[in-house]
Amino acid sequence: MNPTTSTLPLSGNKVIFLDKSALLVFMDQHHPQHGKAVSYFLEWDDLERPLVTLNFIVYELHQWLLEHSGYDHAQFFLNVVQKAEQNGVLTVLSVDEDLEREALQMITDQPQYELSFMKACILLVMGQLEIKRIFSFDPFYKGVVKYFPYIQLIPSGKGD
């Protein structure tokens, strides 16, 4: 894992991990949860909450946007990510060989979680950096909090 430069701490209770679904909903104006995603990002910006994601999440979403929304929207997304990094609001961590190896081991050792490679990487990074919050619209994480009760899912689905 190779963190980029950030002026905000990468661990602790204030840090929020962004998964692919959160970024996708934010970028898809037609998604029914788009307004909710935008309001969270605006609130976190006001509170100066550090945000973290992984490089391959950015790359996968860029490809999805390119295929579904066109070049301009995909490029706009990359520009938003780069600007957020430059402003110290977002840290994009690189997945390195060690993290790849640990994720594959986690998938093999803990089949009960039915983890994808991406989700294993996310959980490992969250654990290593002691990040307790994840912003996600992926229903998978509702089950994760049962196994990892220290993780707080945003939105929680409890009327927020």
Image (cartoon, grey):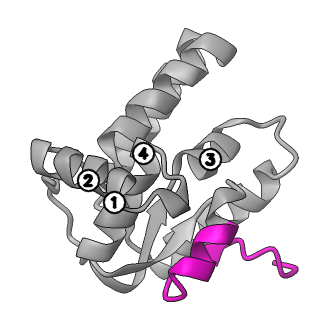
Q: Which residues fall within the magenta stretch?
A: 142-160
Question: Looking at numbered disc 4 in the image, what kind of residue is underneath it?
Answer: Met
> Which dot, 4 or 3, sits closer to the camera?
4
Instruction: Work out whether residue 123 can be spotted.
Output: yes
> Which dot, 2 or 3, sits closer to the camera?
2
N-term-proximal mark, 1 vs 4: 1
- Name the residue tied to disc 3: 21
Return the mark for residue 2.
none
Vertical comparison of 128 with 69: above or below: below
Question: Looking at numbered disc 2 in the image, what kind of residue is underneath it?
Answer: Gln
- 37 vs 13, left or right, is right
Residue ID at (61%, 52%): 22
- Name the residue tied to disc 4: 118
Return the mark for residue 109.
1
N-term-proximal mark, 2 vs 3: 3
Query: Quarter of the image holding residue 94?
Result: top left
> Which dot, 1 or 4, sits closer to the camera?
1
Q: Quadrant of the C terminus?
A: bottom right
Asked if the residue at tag 1 contacts the one at tag 2, i.e. Cβ–Cβ closer than 8 Å, the answer is yes
Local secondary structure at mark 1: helix
Residue ID at (62%, 74%): 153
Nearer to me, 97 or 2: 97
- Name the residue tied to disc 2: 105
Q: CA distance from mark 1 to mark 3?
A: 26 Å
